[in-house]
Amino acid sequence: MRFGIVTPSFRNSAWLRLCVASVADQGVDVEHIVQDAGSDDGTLDWLTRDPRVLAFVEKDSGMYDAINRGLRRTTGDVLAYLNCDEQYLPGALAAVGRIFEERPDIEVLFAGAVVVDAGGRYLCHRMPLVPLKHHSLVSGNLSFLTCATFFRRPIIGSRGLFFDETFRVAGDAAWVVRLIDAGVRMAAVPTLTSAFTDAGGNLGLGPGAATEAARLRATAPAWARTAPWLSVAHHRLRRLLAGHYGRLAPFSYSIYCRDRPERRSLFHVDRPTFRWTRRPTLP
C-alpha cells in the first residue's frame, strides 16, 4: 500500500521542514507532494532540492486549489493532505495502512490528533466522529481534524470528489457533505495519528470564515438553520457515548519542534484533556 500525502505551502518554511520530516520517517512507502505557491521566505532555497519530497512551484487560487493539484499528481493508494504546521506521529501511516487492509469496505478514515502549541507542548487531544450532514452544515465546526483524515484513491478517481476550490476556509466541511451525499463509507477510530499546531491564529476564526459558514448554513434544511443547537446537542451526545469526554490514560508523543528540528522531541502527558481551551467555540 502506497501513501500519497499533499502539503499546500506558502511562506511557511520553518513549519514545512518539520512537516516534511514527520512524513519522511514513517517507514512506509510514501510519496510526499508539496504544492508551493511561490514562497519568497527562503522555502524554495531548500524545498526544490529536498529528496524527501516532490516539489511543485506554481501559483494557485488558494489552499484547496493547491491540494487538488497535488492530489491529481500523486500515485498513492491511500491519500491525505497535511498542512505545513501539522505532523504525523511515529508509526501513524503504518497504523492507518493496517486499518485499511483490515477494513476493505472503508473509503475514508478519521483518526485522532494531539493539539499542541507553537512549542510542541500539549494542549488537548481530539478524537473523531463520523460526520453527519446537518451538523457539518450548521455548527461551524467539524467532527474531525483533517490532519488525521485519510481516504482511498477512488474518492478522487472514479468518484471525482475533489475539494471545492471556491472556498477559502470551509472547503473541508463542503467536501465532507459531498462525501455524505455520495454515500461514501466512512469510519472513525480512537487512534492518535497526527499533531495539529494551535499557534494562536487560524483562518477558521477570521472574517472570511463567517461568510463561508453562512454559505454552508444556507444549504441546510430550514429546521436545521432555525435550531442549530439541535445538531450541536446531538453531536455532543454522540461524543459522550463514544467516550470522548472521559479520562484518557497518561501517554507520550514525539514531534519535530522548531528549536530542535533535526530530531523528534518527546513529550509526556500526565493529565490528558479533551478541552480545547484556546478554541472555546468548539463543541
Image: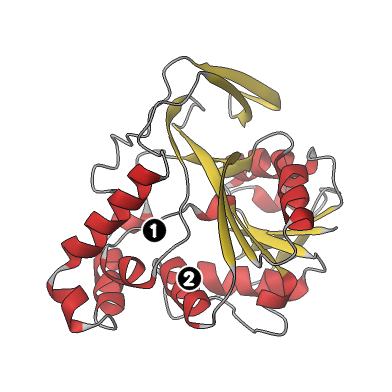
Coordinates of residue 93 in the picture (x, y in percent): 74, 46
Query: What's the residue at 44%, 81% (across, down)?
Result: 166
Left or right? Give the position of 55 relative to 134.
right
Residue 11 in sight:
no
Coordinates of residue 39 in the picture (x, y in percent): 60, 58
Observer-nearest of 79 and 65: 79
Q: Residue type at mark 1?
A: Leu
**SS assignment at label 2:** helix
Left or right? Give the position of 186 relative to 155.
left
What residue would you read off at disc 1?
Answer: 142
What residue would you read off at disc 2?
Answer: 176
Q: How many neighbours does mark 1 have within 10 angstroms: few (below 14), some (14-19), or many (20 or more)?
A: many
**Disc 1 vs disc 2: Cβ atoms closer than 8 Å?**
yes
Answer with mark 1 or mark 2, whichever residue precedes in sequence: 1
**SS assignment at label 1:** loop
Residue 129 in sight:
yes
